[in-house]
Image (cartoon, rainbow, N blue to C red):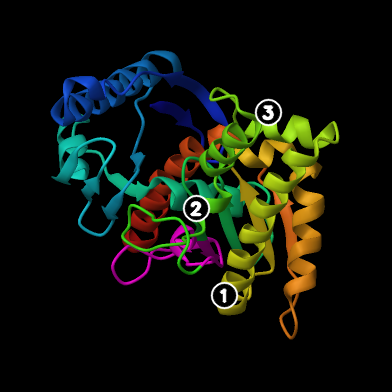
Amino acid sequence: MKAALVAADGALLHQARRATGRDHGPDAVVENILGFAAELRALGAERFGEPAAAAGVAVPGIVDEERGVAAYAANLGWRDVPLRDLLTERLGGIPVALGHDVRTGGLAEGRIGAGKGADRFFFVPLGTGIAGAIGIDGRVEAGAHGFAGEIGHIVVRPGGTPCPCGQNGCLERFASASAVSQAWAEACGDPQADAADCAKAVESGDARARTVWQEAVDALADGLVTALTLLDPRTLIIGGGLAEAGETLFAPLREAVRRRVTFQKLPAVVPAALGDTAGCLGAGLLAWDLLNTSTTARR
């Protein structure tokens, strides 16, 4: 877990990290979140003379943002956790916003990161899996049921590798950091090798690594072109572990996307700017939005 106290302008006033404690079960994770938030609020009161006026929390899985419920998270064992209400109670009744982790990170990248100034953007972090955040005029679209942006489950290789979602050939089975790690470990014969090692091997001219890397880039480009055909973003923001390869990823990716577009307008393809602070910043922005909305409503 990463947490922060965030000022109105997005500045990080204090940051902290803590293990989720998921080995002790889903209830323990919830209690750790509540305790962590309470400690942070107390620290804010002590250090800055007043406690936080609102809170935001971003969680993985399926999130019902309107009801404030963490509906499902496979890696945490959650089902229908009323996280917003629990946090509101623990934090003395202050307003609390609940968001999806990728959409929340995308909100921060869109407002104060790589997408700042873009009226339409699509944020895609390449990590263990692949998700996406659709940015429209300073907000992120969740969709009718909270599933918007799930680009990782666009089928790019029909009949290909099975995906836990039930389909075959999903994008995240070919272009996520974990997929590249697995492909490179098999190609080089080192079970400990990962995507970062593959990138280094590409840079050193290893032919096997170049093949693995290009296959991932081509799959990613196929998925991105499908997304930009539907969404017509001004900016494509690529983040996550795989983006840390820099131009080793972005140079071939921009070229692969350029080759695939026909009538579509080619967006800027840029690296994410906020790194692993995006989620904290986005959660802070959600909290400030609550305060700004309530102030506007009172007027």
* Residue type for callout 3: Asp
Q: Quadrant of the N terminus?
A: top left
Q: In the image, what residue occupies the spot 34% across and 44% down?
A: 60
Q: Which residues are magenta?
A: 134-157
3 or 1: tag closer to the N-terminus: 3
Circles 3, 2 touching at the beta carbon (< 8 Å): no
Chief SS of the magenta region: loop
Is residue 139 magenta-colored? Answer: yes
Q: In the image, what residue occupies the spot 55% across and 33% down?
A: 276
Residues 200 and 271: in front is: 200
The residue beneath circle 1 is: 231
Residue 12 locus on image (x, y percent): 55, 29
* Residue type for callout 1: Leu
Q: Quadrant of residue 186?
A: top right
Mark identifier at residue 197:
3
SS type, badge 1: helix
